Image: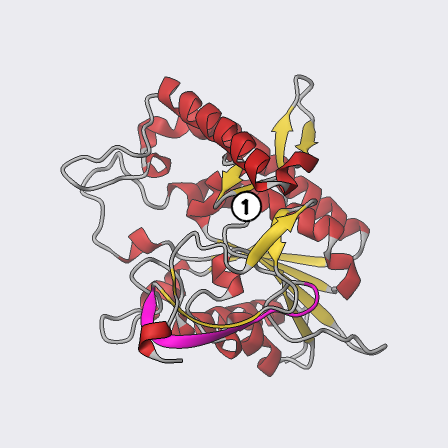
Amino acid sequence: MSANKKKVMTNGDTTFYQFDAQMGFWGVPNLVKEVSFQQCPEVSVMVKHNSDGNRGEEIVLGSNDKSIVCLGGSHTWGAAVDQKERYTDRLGEMLNWKIVNMGHASLGLDQVCLSVLQKSSKYKPEIIVIEQYPWAVHRVLNNYVNGYVRPHFVIDNKGKLQLQKVSSLAKIPFFRNIIGNFFSFRKEFTEFKAGINLKNTTDGIFVDPIFVSWKTRHYDYMYDIIDKILIVIRDYCFQHKIKLLFGLGAIQQQFGPESKSELIDFDLPRKRLIELLEKNKINYVDMTEPMLREHTADSPVIYEDGHINAKGHDLFAKVLHKEFIKLNWITQ
């Protein structure tokens, strides 16, 4: 692809996605496109979706095949890396198992939950891995992402988790925009009442309120929803005899510089998420220590925006593989 014709994808680009009545948006089936990404614009990457709209080759399961379904956001989908460099493909090289990558950029944990319930059974997984970038837990509060309305959960007045499906009108871009703008206004108004302005900066440096200790009360409802979503995923896996593992990536801010204030804790969403995973007896592996250990200025494991690069994906796969062995889910 010549440089003057090269398409550079930016964060929030929806080229790979289309409206989906269940998930709000999902990958375009059978899409094939060579692009460059904002994180690494000098390198062209081939993106190829299968007939299910997932980035990867067609998955055909034989009667004796074992499969692992991996879900997550843009890290799992593989932003700015070749398909063969993703942690799922590296896992496939380490194991004699079918690895199904169902990751999609900007998926929230609520959409991941729906994917487990409604899409994963096709692949008859023995193991489900959910990659979760801790900062991205806030997506369960954001019902309009990249021009698409998302299905989402709310807690009713009886404390029960209720699914708010995507309106059929959202299939039409005009109405999707109207619905989405209403959701965006409602979210910003709720944040305004809590003293949160996500567009605000201080001395040119933006600090996301999710890391700010005195703003944690605003996010209590968010963590309550996450708690109940985790229970739904856990119970589904238990009922279907599927082993469940969360993989928590290291967030961009943890690679430095360190916070100068004790009131700003870049580890805050991770700690809250780990508390919920342990409370609900869900297996997880924290990638923070190995990723920080292997990261150097000359050989980083992430791009500048926090997405894991090829080295980060390889490390992610090795840590997951080691955890599978530790849990006695696979033989060495």
Expressed as whole percent of the image width and height from the top left, the position of residue 42 reads 31, 75
How many numbered badges does the structure rendering display?
A: 1
Q: Is residue 247 magenta?
A: no
- The answer to whether 218 is drawn above or below residue 31 in the figure is above
Q: Is residue 210 visible?
A: yes
The picture places residue 231, in percent across and down from the top left corner, at: 67, 40
What span is in magenta?
Answer: 39-52
From the image, which quarter does the N terminus lie in?
bottom left
Please state the horizontal and vertical placement of residue 66, each as a whole percent of the image: 75, 73
Q: Eyeballing the image, is 92 above or below 133?
A: below
For residue 129, side relative to residue 182 (left or right): right
Quadrant containing the C terminus in the rendered view: bottom right
Which residue is painted at 37% across and 37% down in the image? 210
Task: Tell me if 139 is positioned left or right of 61 in this view.
Answer: left
| View extreme (right): residue | 63
From the image, tell me which residue sits under label 1: 108
In the figure, is residue 234 to the left or right of 309? right
Q: Secondary structure at mark 1?
A: loop
Q: Picture coordinates of residue 142 (x, y %)?
A: 50, 36
Rendered residue at 45%/48% (across/down): 134
Residue 109 sits in which quadrant? Answer: top right
Category of crowding for the residue at label 1, using alpha-carbon neighbours closer than 10 angstroms: few (below 14), some (14–19), many (at least 20): many
Q: What residue is rendered at 18% in x and 35% in y?
A: 202
Would you identify the image quadrant in which residue 217 lies? top left
Q: Amino acid at mark 1?
A: Gly
Magenta stretch, overall SS: strand
The colour mode here is: secondary structure
Q: Quadrant of residue 157?
A: top right
Is residue 50 in the magenta section?
A: yes
Regarding residue 167, the answer to whether it shows in the image is no
**Residue at figure coordinates x 64%, y 35% from the top left:** 228
